[in-house]
Amino acid sequence: MRPPQEYDGAPLPAEAEAPDARAPAMMICARLAGRAIIRVVGRCEDAQENRELDLSECQLMQVPDAVYHLMRHTELKSCDLSGNVITKIPPKFAVKFSLISELNLSNNQMARLPDELCTLACLQRLDISHNSFVSLPPIAAQCPSLHTVLAHHNQIIEVDVDRLARSRALEYVDLSDNPIPPRIHEQLKQLSRPSVSVSEREPEEWEDLIG
């Protein structure tokens, strides 16, 4: 007996179609996102006890609003956001975490900091190394208690040397492994305070030509 016409060369019913090839990848992504959220919540709970918020290596593109909510009753003394893919810090960060003395923003994708961070009166140590800064942020010389700034491995070509020299609190600035121009490089080496680390310059080819 000949099979029914509707099954003769017709496509299989929908329920028998091949599964979406993207499904496993989507499930893995959802699982990873879930783990990241659990990790962030767990570290916020730890910070409620020790007042040290460690959100390093948490796959963050920004500081989640939930973090500000979870930490609203905790007076943090340090915050570590290193090893993420954060591109910017919002102005409210300085309001929510106004008492921190250490801030680690290293190994992210930041090129600037909000001016509001200059109001962090207790901040003593700032790490912005391994980012994309092209100028040393004003916070380096404006925070009243900031004594150490780590800004190595960026793309810094602009530094307000006079402002650094006028800072009363600043003791050490690491600007090594930055493409600092010759004039600023020499000015920084002549500073007696703060102490500034800069990489030794190798003359560019064009400098040899005009030398």
Image: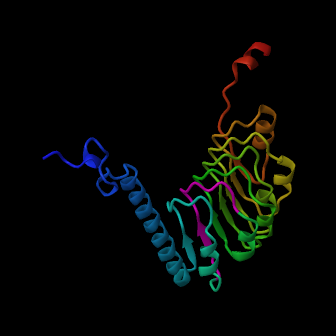
Residue 176 screen position, x and y as percent: 65, 43
* Majority secondary structure in the magenta region: loop
User: In percent of the image, x 69 and y 67: which residue is there?
Assistant: 124
Image position of 188 (left or right of 153) = right
Q: Quadrant of residue 60?
A: bottom right
Image position of 138 (left or right of 93) = right
Q: Quadrant of residue 172?
A: bottom right
Magenta segment:
75-89
Q: Quadrant of residue 35?
A: bottom left
User: In percent of the image, x 46 and y 70: which residue is there?
Assistant: 39
The question of residue 77 being in magenta is answered with: yes
State whether residue 90 is above or below residue 205. Answer: below
User: In percent of the image, x 53 and y 77: which residue is there?
Assistant: 44
Image position of 153 (left or right of 208) = left
Residue 22 screen position, x and y as percent: 40, 51
Residue 169 screen position, x and y as percent: 78, 64
From this viewpoint, which residue is outermost toward the front? 1
Residue 104 screen position, x and y as percent: 61, 62
State whether residue 173 is above or below residue 49. Answer: above
Q: Nearer the viewer, residue 45 or 14?
A: 14
User: In percent of the image, x 53 and y 81: which residue is there?
Assistant: 50
Could you tell me how many numbered marks the image carries?
0
Specify the color scheme.
rainbow
